[in-house]
Amino acid sequence: MNTVALSELERVGVDFSAQTMLSVRDKTRAAIHEIAARCTPGMVEEEAVEIAKGILKAAGMQRGWHDVYVRFGSNTTKTFGEASDPGVVLGEDDIFLIDIGPVWETWEGDGGDTFVTGSNADMARCKRDAKALFHLVRAKWRDEKLTGEALYEFAESEASALGWALNLDLSGHRISDFPHAAIYEGPLAEIPFHPAPLLWVLEIHIRHPEQPYGAFFEDMLLEDEYFDPAL
């Protein structure tokens, strides 16, 4: 790509507002935690998806730019767009993830997180490591100004060192004040420049190399001040 083509990948619309993008992010992350609070052991995954859709609609979501994903147990290994195995029930010692892409008015939200029930230590570590890896990669973005390609090369290496397999089919993308696909539909992992804040989401999806579970964390590329260590 030439310099002009690269700059086009970070083009924004005339109505772009950094403050609105941050407000949309806050609304999206609040919805994720509200959905998680309604997911309880004994619930079938399909019920959780319907609950999530209801929560998002009540919050003012006009539509989603991608499907609502609530994945239980073995379905946490599925990649983006892959259908869940039907009828999976959330167990007492289990893991589940949420991945939503709501459109609030004309603004795209996107985010994901993982949660555990009970006291399975390995699943709890998987959840923690997905978020920790997100922040390790984000620190490389912040401090070393790495390209999107280099960020995911680092992410893959670090995931392996932690004992997980990184799913590179979920490797970040643009986000925008109008459909980002109109600008760039490809992954963050393929861009050969340092991505700007507010315009890209970083996705980390790790899977156990042998057991049927994984964890996911997704959020915008932003400086430290925008992250609450308690969440």
Image (cartoon, rainbow, N blue to C red):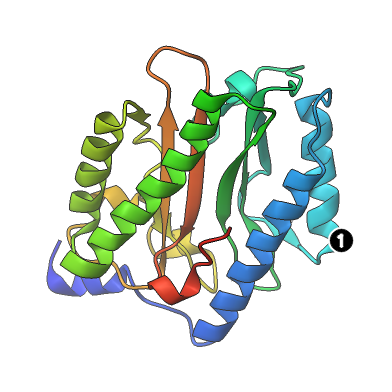
Name which quarter of the figure residue 39 lies in: top right
Percent across and percent down for residue 102 are 66, 58
Question: Looking at this view, is 3 or 194 the one in front?
Answer: 194
Question: Looking at this view, is 189 or 144 the one in front?
Answer: 144
In the displayed orientation, state which residue is furthest to the left: 2
Left or right side of 35 for 113 = left
Percent across and percent down for residue 188 are 32, 53
Residue at left offset 33%, top offset 59% = 138
Left or right side of 186 for 80 = right
Crowd tier of the residue under label 1, counting other residues whose Cα lies within 10 Å: few below 14, some 14–19, many 20 or above: few
Q: How many marks?
A: 1
Residue at left offset 24%, top offset 52% = 151
Residue at left offset 38%, top offset 35% = 169
Asked whether residue 17 is in view, the answer is: no
> For the N terminus, which image quadrant?
bottom left
Residue at left offset 81%, top offset 64% = 59
Left or right side of 222 for 49 = right
Dot 1: what SS?
Answer: helix
Residue 208 higher or lower than 22, as above or below: above
Percent across and percent down for residue 167 are 38, 32
What amino acid is at disc 1?
A: Ala
Question: Looking at this view, is 160 or 120 the one in front?
Answer: 120
Left or right side of 197 for 112 = right
Residue 127 higher or lower than 103, as above or below: above
Q: Which residue is mark 1?
A: 58
